[in-house]
Image (cartoon, rainbow, N blue to C red):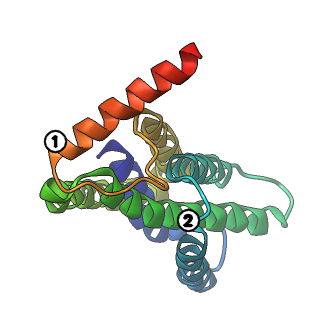
C-alpha cells in the first residue's frame, strides 16, 4: 500500500503541477497525456520478460530522480526544455510503474483475498492522489520543490518497499491462503537445501 501511495501521488499530481514549470502549459499537458500511451504499451509488451520487483524499483527510482531534477533552475534558456524532459520521464516512469504494480498486486495474492487486496492497493493509489492537489498548489506559491520535490522523494522512498515483497514472475497463482503458505514454505526449504549442497 505504501508503494501505491507513492505512485498515486506522482501519477495524479504531476499533471496538476505543470503550471509551476516555465514551459507552455498546453504543450506540457499534451506531452503528458501522450506519454501514457507508450507507458501502457511497454507494460503490455514487456510484462512477460521482466521481473516485477526490478521493474517497479527502476521505474519508481527513475521517477523520483527525474522529478527532483525538474525542480532545478538553470540560467540558460534551454533549461526549460530540459525541465519538461525530466518531468515527462518522471511521469512516464510513474505510469509504467502503475501498470506493472497493478499486475504485481494481482499475482501477489491468492484468489480468496485478491479482490480485497487489489481494492486496498487501489485505494492507497487514490489516497496518494488526494494529497497531490495541495502539493501542486503549494508548489505554485512557494516554489516547485513543494510539488515536484516532494513527489520525487515520496515515490523514490516508497518505491523501495518493493524490496520486501517476493518476486511473482513465472510463479503460479494460488487459490487459497493455505496453498500460498505451502508454496512459500517449500520455496524456503528448497533454497535452504540448495544452499547446503
Q: Residue at x 44, y 41 (%)?
A: 162
Q: Which residue is mark 2?
A: 91
Secondary element type, mark 1: helix
Q: Residue at x 58, y 61 (%)?
A: 93
In the picture, the quarter occupied by the C terminus is top right
Q: Is residue 188 left or right of residue 90?
A: left
Q: Quadrant of residue 38?
A: bottom right
Q: Which percent across, then down, holds residue 43? A: 54, 71
The residue furthest front is: 197
Q: Residue at x 20, y 54 (%)?
A: 117
Classed neighbour count for the residue bearing mark 1: other residues with Cα under 10 Å, few (<14), some (14–19), many (≥20)? few
Using the image as rendered, state which of residue 142 and residue 66 is in the foreground.
66
Q: Quadrant of residue 79?
A: bottom right
Classed neighbour count for the residue bearing mark 2: other residues with Cα under 10 Å, few (<14), some (14–19), many (≥20)? many
Residue 182, above or below 49:
above
Residue 155, above or below 39:
above
Q: Residue at x 51, y 41 (%)?
A: 153
Q: Which percent across, then down, holds residue 140? A: 47, 59
Confirm whether residue 76 shows in the render.
yes
Q: Which percent across, then down, holds residue 19? A: 52, 70
Secondary element type, mark 2: helix
Distance of label 1 from label 2 (alpha carbons): 39 Å
Q: Which residue is mark 1?
A: 178
Confirm whether residue 143 shows in the render.
no
Q: Is residue 180 left or right of residue 102?
A: left
Q: Which percent across, then down, holds residue 42? A: 60, 73
Residue 25, above or below 148:
below
Amino acid at each position: 500500500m505504501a508503494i501505491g501511495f507513492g505512485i498515486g501521488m506522482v501519477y495524479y499530481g504531476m499533471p496538476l503541477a505543470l503550471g509551476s514549470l516555465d514551459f507552455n502549459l498546453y504543450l506540457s499537458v499534451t506531452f503528458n497525456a501522450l506519454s501514457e500511451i507508450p507507458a501502457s504499451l511497454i507494460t503490455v509488451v514487456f510484462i512477460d520478460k521482466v521481473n516485477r520487483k526490478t521493474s517497479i524499483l527502476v521505474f519508481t527510482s527513475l521517477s523520483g530522480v527525474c522529478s527532483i531534477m525538474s525542480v532545478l533552475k538553470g540560467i540558460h534558456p534551454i533549461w526549460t526544455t530540459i525541465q519538461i524532459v525530466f518531468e515527462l520521464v518522471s511521469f512516464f516512469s510513474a505510469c509504467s510503474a502503475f501498470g506493472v504494480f497493478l499486475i504485481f498486486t494481482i499475482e501477489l495474492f491468492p484468489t480468496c483475498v485478491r479482490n480485497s487486496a487489489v481494492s486496498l492497493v487501489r485505494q492507497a493509489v487514490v489516497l496518494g492522489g488526494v494529497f497531490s492537489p495541495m502539493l501542486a498548489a503549494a508548489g505554485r506559491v512557494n516554489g516547485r520543490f513543494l510539488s515536484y520535490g516532494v513527489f520525487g522523494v515520496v515515490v523514490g522512498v516508497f518505491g523501495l518497499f518493493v524490496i520486501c515483497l517476493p518476486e511473482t514472475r513465472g510463479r503460479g497463482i494460488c487459490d487459497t491462503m493455505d496453498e500460498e503458505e505451502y508454496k512459500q514454505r517449500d520455496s524456503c526449504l528448497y533454497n535452504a537445501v540448495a544452499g547446503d549442497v
